[in-house]
Amino acid sequence: MWRRGRESFGHLRRFSTAVRRRSEDEGDWLYASEWWGSTNDDGKTILRSTSAKGNGVVSVVAHPSSRPNRMHWQKMERWLQQRCEEVHPGYGNEGNLRVLGYQWRVLRFNDVTRQSTAKVMLTYRENKPEHVYLMQQPHCLAVPYVKSMLSAGLSAISSCNFDIISTLQGKKNMNILCIGHGGGSLPLFLASKIQGAIVHVVEIDPLVISASIRAMGFPAFSLMTQSGHRPSAKPDIINEVMWKGTHERICLHETDAEEFITNNTNLYDMIFVDAYDGDDVFPHKLWDPDSPFLKSLKTQLHPKHGTVVVNLHSDVDVRNHDGSTPSEFEQVLPMGKYVSQVCRAYKDVLLGTGSCGEKRGSGIAFTVAVPWTCNTSLVACRGFDRDNQYINRDLVLNTLISKSLELEHVMDLPFSCLEYIKGGLILVD
């Protein structure tokens, strides 16, 4: 979940971070005008229902996407046909899969809050055009704060002598936990780009899970039962065609985050937390330093390189001189006034205390401002530059920049990690 900043969609400054030529970023913020909606074009409502878990009215709205254009559809159709032959030889004889088009699908809470956005490919089989299949495009990240969380978090863990190359190639596992699901773009990106990623996703609202699968093209085979197993031993053919090699490494759990984390003993390399509710509030129990959630999170974070990334609504633009939130903004930004407390809680519980310039041994915590939106990414990382006894902002920033450039290259990212790191980096004291 995010809040849009004051910047317009046009005239966005670009930073050149590498010599290599990137593929087109179909999730570039320049395209946000296609799915943000207006009074003249609010899109087509695909799903709408009332949540029983505090998220109010949950809906999915579709908007047409201009990318990729029709000249590129045949390439995807050839890929689908090749996958059919690989996964189920002879299946293509029943009629080739054709691309019907591409859409933005926006998950909304209470018709106002845009919880998440994903690009979806719509396909159909030639002999059964009445059946339309959805496939979320994992390479396309439409929302800046998701790119920020990924850029800052992966750059941080790569700075801890973590072998990111082996995990990208699938030679080494990387255990990841995502608290909060939304449309599923974050876990799907991780599982698609990192071949060694084993991604557990926790979402309390069954309606959100249903919306992501039925209306946003998230792989259905990833859903787990309450007993921790998959409902079926094998996915259907169309899901196997679209997601074989990826959906087996995603485990989507319908449960409360605190209950999940206190009842398992997994050790995670990375944990992503993005858990705002329908009222745009980050639940107190997920940042209370005395809560079972944070205490359990501490024991399940890898001691040498464990990294936690939290999406927060930024309050830097609305604070008084004494750091308090003006009363007129308390209802507009119900979470904003707690950002500094959240940062302190995660740092103290997960890393222990210690301030800038002092000897440390358990890692660092820092925040980065998200471009174009009023969000902040908090990163708490164990083992950051463990051989250095002292830390300062320049050392952290320079290390992150170096690692981000490496990641852009080895992961073949369509966006610049540097663009989501260099803005407003602050060490958490």
Image (spheres, rainbow, N blue to C red):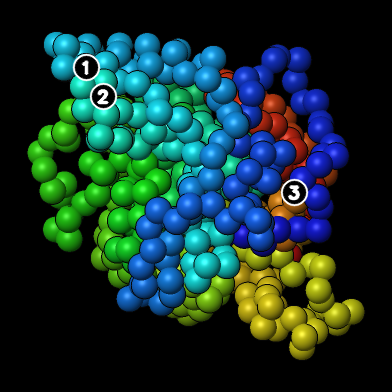
The quadrant of the picture occupied by the N terminus is: bottom right
**Could you tell me residue 418's position as x and y percent?**
73, 35
Whether residue 101 is visible here, answered yes or no, is yes
Q: Is residue 200 left or right of residue 71?
A: left
Q: Residue at x 58, y 28 (%)?
A: 67
Which label's residue is closer to the chain start, 3 or 1? Answer: 1
Q: Say the numbered circle drawn on residue 125.
A: 2
Q: CA distance from mark 3 to mark 1?
A: 45 Å
For discs 3 and 2, the disc positioned in front in the rendered view: 2
**Could you tell me residue 115's position as x and y percent?**
52, 59
Can you say whether 28 is above or below 287 in the image? Answer: above
Q: Is residue 82 left or right of residue 386?
A: left
Q: Say the numbered circle drawn on residue 371.
A: 3
Which secondary structure lies at badge 1? Answer: loop
Can you say whether 7 is above or below 410 in the image? Answer: below
- Report crowding for label 3: few under 14, some 14 to 19, many 20 or more residues within 10 A (C-alpha): many
Q: Is residue 126 left or right of residue 332?
A: left
For discs 3 and 1, the disc positioned in front in the rendered view: 1
Q: Is residue 232 left or right of residue 125?
A: left
**Could you tell me residue 363's position as x and y percent?**
61, 52
Check disc 1 and report the residue beneath it.
95
Which secondary structure lies at badge 2? Answer: strand
* Residue type, label 1: Gly
Q: Are marks 1 and 2 in contact (CB under 8 Å)?
A: yes
Which label's residue is closer to the chain start, 1 or 2? Answer: 1
* Residue type, label 3: Pro
How many circles with numbers are drawn on the protein?
3
Which of the 4 quarters of the picture holds residue 158?
Answer: top right
